[in-house]
Image: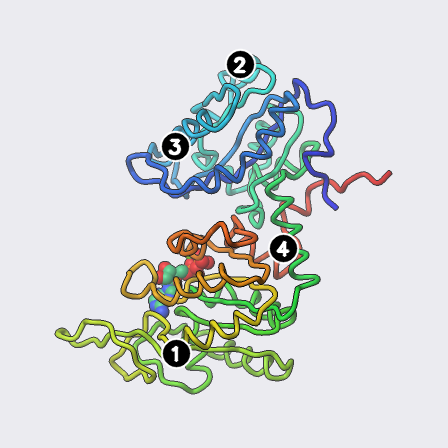
Amino acid sequence: MKRTVKDLVNLEGKVVLLRVDFNVPIDDGGKILDTTRIIQALPTIKYLIEKKAKIVLISHLGRPDGYDIRKSLWPIAMILMRELPTPVYFSNKVLGKEVEEQIKQMENGSVLLLENIRFYKEEIECDMNFAKQIALLGQIFVNDAFGVAHREHATTYGLARLMPNAIGLLMEKEITTLSEAIQSPRRPFVVVLGGAKVKGKIKFILKLLDVADTLILGGAMAYTFLVASGISVGESIVDDDDVGFARDMLSIAKLKNKKILLPIDHVCIRETPKKKRPFVSEKLDDDMFAFDIGPKTIKLFKEELTKAKQILWNGPLGKYEDKRFAKGTSAIAKTIAKSSAFSIVGGGDSISAVKKAGVEKKINLISTGGGATLKYIEKGSLPCLDVIQEKIKI
Ligand code: ADP
Ligand code: MG
């Protein structure tokens, strides 16, 4: 068991470097479009405030190439000021005399948010000299950034190697829920996989064939599997390199006696200039593009989901950003929300689909990680977690 922030003692007056994941969607005017990740980080921050620590928050936002005002964390500081009971300060630097001075002047229980750590390329390079300079700013490192725990960066992985450390409450909640769900699943355990990237999800699918009972495949990735089972998919998105892999997965599923469900009808369009209106079809002709699952598929998937005791969902079932192709994803989101099964949803797009359907409160775990969630399920561990100290057994 990894040490958590609750295992730390004598925090009063100590400078805690707290790595969080404030990588929220933000528009060019600095307006935050979804505050979920900020809200989910609050319990650890509030816990440290109660313990009268001095909290220095470190986060990234997007993938800036050097300084970029559109990726500044300043708008997030404004939200923290509204949400936290104690003073919140902001520093537009992450290193140097000015920051050191600012930290010296902090009252116990106050919070200092440092500017976007990815303005420094040393962060993703995991430059240990950079990490060492940051480590000098505080006495303890707490990692609560589950969303990037699969990446070895200077302030996620590097700092843990240099300082006394622990995980935060969000990270703890994510990993205990996920590990229980995978190690002792409530059965039948049904997994719904959609989205576009087959490649990124290959090893994940292999693992799921071990632990899940049924795999429901939708979204663009389903077409690679349909091709692998000899069904024509017209112009729908297919990952040619992965057809062989998909074929292997279908045979492994058969061997292991696991069910894989694929779409049986589709919402599609025909690529003739005058007929752009979507229609439902079971068969996909050469000039047809499928962008969503059809009504028969929705019914088939729903039947399977109602039998489930545990559901894991990753990836939308259609091109849901376009409302003509959002029905399938929305129907599945609502079915999962209604079911009495223990439900976990992970992945940026799947989470925004759940929110669009207005059912996020009915999901047991909205996992803040996309890649991290899949990696943790696949491996049962994450690089940034491996470098955290174990709980001391007494
Ligand atoms: P997540 O972020 O939940 O992990 P992905 O990033 O893998 O999911 O995939 C999401 C993307 O997949 C969305 O942009 C969606 O439009 C796209 N998508 C899903 N189904 C289809 C489809 N049938 N055709 C084209 N794009 C699709
Ligand atoms: Mg995505």
Identity of the amino acid at label 4?
Leu
The label on residue 178 is: 4
**x then y, percent, for residue 89:** 47, 20
Q: Where is residue 201? Give x, y as percent.
A: 51, 65
Indicate the secondary structure of the residue bearing disc 4: helix
Dot 4 or dot 3, earlier in sequence: 3
Marks 2 and 1: which is nearer the front? 1
Residue closest to the eye, 334 or 322:
334
Q: Earlier in the sequence, mark 2 or mark 1?
A: 2
The numbered disc on residue 101 is 2
The residue under the point 75% across, 46% down is: 1
Q: Residue 250 at what x, y percent from top left?
A: 54, 81
Mark with earlier residue (3, 2) = 3
Badge 3 crowding class, 10 Å Cα cut-off, few under 14, some 14 to 19, many 20 or more, is many
Tell me whether circle 4 and circle 1 mark residues in contact (CB < 8 Å): no
119 on left or right of 380: left
Residue position marked by numbered label 3 in the rendering: 72
Query: Where is 119 relative to 347, above or below?
Result: above
